[in-house]
């Protein structure tokens, strides 16, 4: 098997998980890293034994000519970096949120399509093993035709300590977390025709919204609710668990706290522990997210080797990003927004 040589742009908080995951995938070797912050760059290089360290992305990509680049920077920098990689015919994985605007996102997709370059968005929540297990249970068809769904993420976890910039933006929970939950809703229930949104800021020390409730009309005819909160204080902190409810004509599916999956159908009720494994480099409670990073990056490698479009391609992610934009429009106008209009 030919070795795939990868390069990383962005050595921040979350990129450590990506580097750990690359180290577990057979036939992949990260050969270079890039960050404008020299201290952060050196810390990542020392931690993972990467000698080729650059402060300029163009210099790195031209000098190293990697088989793919993993862009783990913030959204405003994505377009320039993706277009740079496309111009050099280098396949791209790009961190979410994909872009700060639909125009930028479409431009990135177009640039990669013109260059014939694979593009995947690191939309990893649908790759959590408990979510994959829900999809399997739904696909089995034993609950009949689904008519209602709910994707819920409610927590009071201090996400600001590790990512202080989250408290500074005009947009917060829909763009940072809701995008994942909306993508899960698309993954489980299909594409969305319309969305109605309400938001609230509970924490006075942040600028954006920390609570969002979204009602989705799916093209299949079913409805779902996506609700997110970083202001919900519970008896037991559930971070970073995503809970799911699905009602069908012949039964129901529940993914409850503690990764407990319950399926009720004509055969009765079955319970299953779908807890994600604790990888050697992972730590609780992040292990669920960390495992999903490994699974999506494995999917990228498999797709790249097979020459097929990844499930969370740039083109697919345009639909999820459009829901984020529609949610903010709807929250501002307090009206239902046609998701296709974006």
Image (cartoon, rainbow, N blue to C red):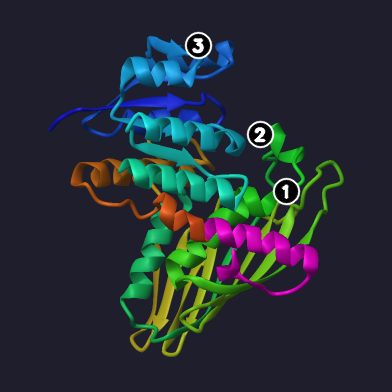
Q: Which residue is mark 2?
A: 163
The label number, if any, that marks residue 285 in the structure image = none
Q: Position of residue 281 (x, y in %)?
A: 41, 30
Q: Earlier in the sequence, mark 1 or mark 2?
A: 2
Foreground residue, 89 or 221? 89
Tell me which segment is drawn in magenta.
Answer: 320-342
Residue at point 81%, 44% (across, down): 207
Q: Quadrant of the N terminus?
A: top left
Residue 250 vs 112, above or below: the answer is below
Percent coordinates x, y for residue 168 in the rendering: 77, 37
Marking on residue 171 = 1
Q: Assign a secondary structure to mark 3.
A: helix
Q: Main secondary structure of the magenta part?
A: helix
Mark 2 falls on what kind of element? Answer: loop
* Residue wearing tag 3: 42
Q: Residue furthest right?
A: 204
First in sequence: mark 3 vs mark 1: 3
């Amino acid at each position: 098997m030919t070795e795939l040589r990868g390069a990383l742009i962005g050595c921040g908080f979350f990129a450590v998980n990506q580097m750990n995951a690359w180290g577990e995938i057979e036939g992949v070797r990260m050969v270079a890293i890039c960050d404008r912050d020299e201290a952060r760059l050196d810390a990542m290089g020392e931690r993972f034994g990467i000698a080729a360290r650059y402060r300029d992305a163009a210099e790195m990509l031209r000098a190293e000519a990697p088989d793919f680049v993993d862009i783990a920077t913030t959204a405003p920098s994505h377009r320039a970096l993706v277009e740079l990689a496309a111009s050099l015919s280098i396949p791209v994985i790009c961190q979410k949120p994909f872009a700060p605007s639909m125009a930028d996102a479409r431009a990135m997709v177009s640039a990669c399509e013109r260059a014939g370059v694979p593009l995947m968005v690191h939309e990893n929540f649908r790759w959590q093993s408990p979510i994959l297990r829900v999809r399997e249970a739904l696909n089995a068809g034993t609950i009949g035709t689904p008519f209602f769904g709910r994707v819920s993420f409610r927590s009071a976890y201090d996400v600001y300590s590790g990512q202080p910039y989250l408290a500074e933006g005009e947009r917060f929970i829909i763009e940072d977390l809701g995008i994942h939950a909306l993508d899960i809703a698309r993954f489980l229930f299909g594409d969305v025709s319309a969305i109605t949104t309400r938001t609230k800021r509970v924490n006075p020390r942040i600028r954006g919204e920390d609570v969002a409730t979204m009602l989705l009309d799916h093209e299949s005819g079913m409805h779902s609710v996506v609700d997110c909160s970083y202001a919900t204080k519970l008896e037991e902190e559930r971070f970073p668990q995503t809970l799911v409810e699905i009602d069908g004509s012949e039964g129901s599916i529940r993914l409850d706290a503690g990764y407990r999956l319950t399926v009720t159908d004509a055969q009765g009720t079955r319970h299953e522990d779908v807890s994600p494994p604790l990888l050697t480099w992972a730590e609780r409670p992040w292990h669920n997210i960390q495992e999903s990073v490994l699974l999506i990056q494995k999917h990228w490698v498999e797709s790249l080797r097979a020459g097929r479009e990844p499930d969370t391609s740039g083109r697919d992610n345009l639909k999820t990003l459009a829901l984020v934009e529609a949610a903010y429009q709807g929250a501002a106008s307090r009206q239902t927004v046609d998701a296709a209009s974006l």
